[in-house]
Image (spheres, helix red, strand yellow):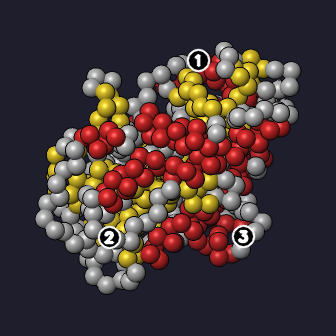
Amino acid sequence: MLHTTKHYGIPAAIGAAEFANRQLGLEQKSVGFVPAPVSHTPWQLEAKLWQQAQHKAQLLGQLLVHLSQQTTWLQQQSEPLRSGSNMTSLLVRMLNTISQQPERASEVPLLRHDFMLDQHQNWRWVESNPIAAGMGPLNEQWLSLLRSNSPPASWADNSATLSQAQLLFDAAKLQAERAGHGYPLIVFVVEPVEGNRLDQELLAQALRQLGARVLRKTLPELYTATVSPQHRLQLAEGEADLLYFRTGYNLDDLAADTAAWHQHRTQWQRLRLALCPGIRLQLAGSKWIQTKIQQELAQNPSRLPIPASWDKHDRQQLQNLTVATTPAAELKKATAIQLLQQGWLLKNQQEGGGHLLQTADAIDRIQQGVEPAEGFVLMQRIPALIRTEGVFTQRQGKIKHWPKAISELGLFTVGSSANYGGYLLRTKQAAQLEGGIHKGGAVLDTVQLQPDACCNRWLDSGVNSRAYTATKSHLPTSNAI
């Protein structure tokens, strides 16, 4: 169960200087530092639900790492996208390239799995992010700042910065030791103009404290590197041990040079280098493969490759996360339009905010026709629970009250065992579709754990919730969903 927060009047706004001291903000080209938008009202969550979410995130992390190693399965599931022009299609073609050559690179799994609670207080899988899964360090900073300004409480642990830094450092150190070097060199692969640079810098600072050298390189800068006779990536500053991608997940990141991306991304797989992530894991965590995972769980669960250590209970845990989704090209146009009229959403293969279409916009896109290689997916909206206790938010120094809100919990997993690596909690107004911090109207939030279930009341919303991936077997046969 979930609990109502006790309010002691309207909270006082925290000054911008305190945000700046903790690097708790975003950077905007025209104005510079901007304090991150935040919630002063922690989400009251029963400890049991928190533990359930951690377990489900670990299962998802282990599954995606396992599937990244199943080359034939990935190729079969992604074949419809092979001729497309989206990022997932590029990954499919790159997988075909690297599967025919020796691979020396090691995979470093750092993922975030996003969940919502439905009206029955069951966790539902929104999506997983295998690349550029950020904002954990910023959320940790907000927890620290809010905690220092709040009465004692049972706060959910968020050690995102150190746990993620340790993962990257250990992987880079292993490569450096094999090459006979001392201090590992880690390269953050970034966009030329990076609004989320401070989140990255918090992680970079932790890496430097562990003993790593950290560089920031754009893709064009990285393309100028050479390859040593020992199959190492040679930069002017030294041999790189790990590439940590904070870009390279959308076509816009490539500056229209997809040929260079294909050439260098596949080349890096052949080097003695750690990649976070590699091509395989990035494809395994794509929106398309997530859709195929859920179709298999609903229709043919025994055909889904799962880790050898799992049992039937683990598979059932994943099945309980999913609801309806289907590739748009598999539906008749009239059926797709009917679902969209009933509130379903249309999503492409782009990552980040701004890529969900609904109602008239989605219907217009379907009427134009969709090809299998485009990878469009229809998704039923999640019947998300609404926080009706009211949430006080702070944005640009001003306190506002949201009477109804929806929270989305992102849990990070680190390594092939998918251990807990911190959280990102985003809260948005219940009527809002997009829920991003950098792009969207959400705020950073925190979790307080409650020992028992007693007193919270919730409203169900089937209208304004975030879409989430699910299974074709739940497609409605009538007007009701």
What's the amino acid at mark 1?
A: Pro
Q: Name the side, left or right, on which 264 lies relative to 128.
A: right
Vertical comparison of 186 with 67: above or below: above
Q: Name the side, left or right, on which 429 lies relative to 286.
A: left
Vertical comparison of 37 with 475: above or below: above
> Which is nearer the N-term, disc 2 or disc 1?
2
Closer to the camera in the image, 54 or 325: 54
What residue sits 22% from the left and 44% below the top? Answer: 15
What residue sits 67% from the left and 20% below the top? Answer: 237
Please provide percent x and percent y for residue 67: 71, 53
Residue contact at pointers 2 and 3, CB within 8 angstroms: no
> Which is nearer the N-term, disc 3 or disc 1?
1
Please state which of the two labelled residues, at mark 2 or mark 1, is closer to the viewer. Answer: 2
> Which is nearer the N-term, disc 2 or disc 3?
2
Q: Spatial distance from mark 2 to mark 3, Cα to Cα?
A: 39 Å
Q: Spatial distance from mark 3 to mark 1, Cα to Cα?
A: 42 Å
One can see residue 214 in this view:
yes
Label of residue 152 in the image: 2
Asked which quadrant contains residue 57, the reply is bottom right
One can see residue 111 in this view:
no
Please provide percent x and percent y for residue 272: 79, 33
Q: Residues within 10 Å of mark 3 (few under 14, many from 20)?
A: few
What residue sits 64% from the left and 39% below the top? Answer: 211
Q: Which residue is mark 3?
A: 310
| Image quarter in which the N terminus is found | bottom left
Label of residue 220 in the image: 1
What's the amino acid at mark 2?
A: Pro
Q: Say what secondary structure mark 2 lies in.
A: loop
**Residue occupying the far left of the picture:** 9
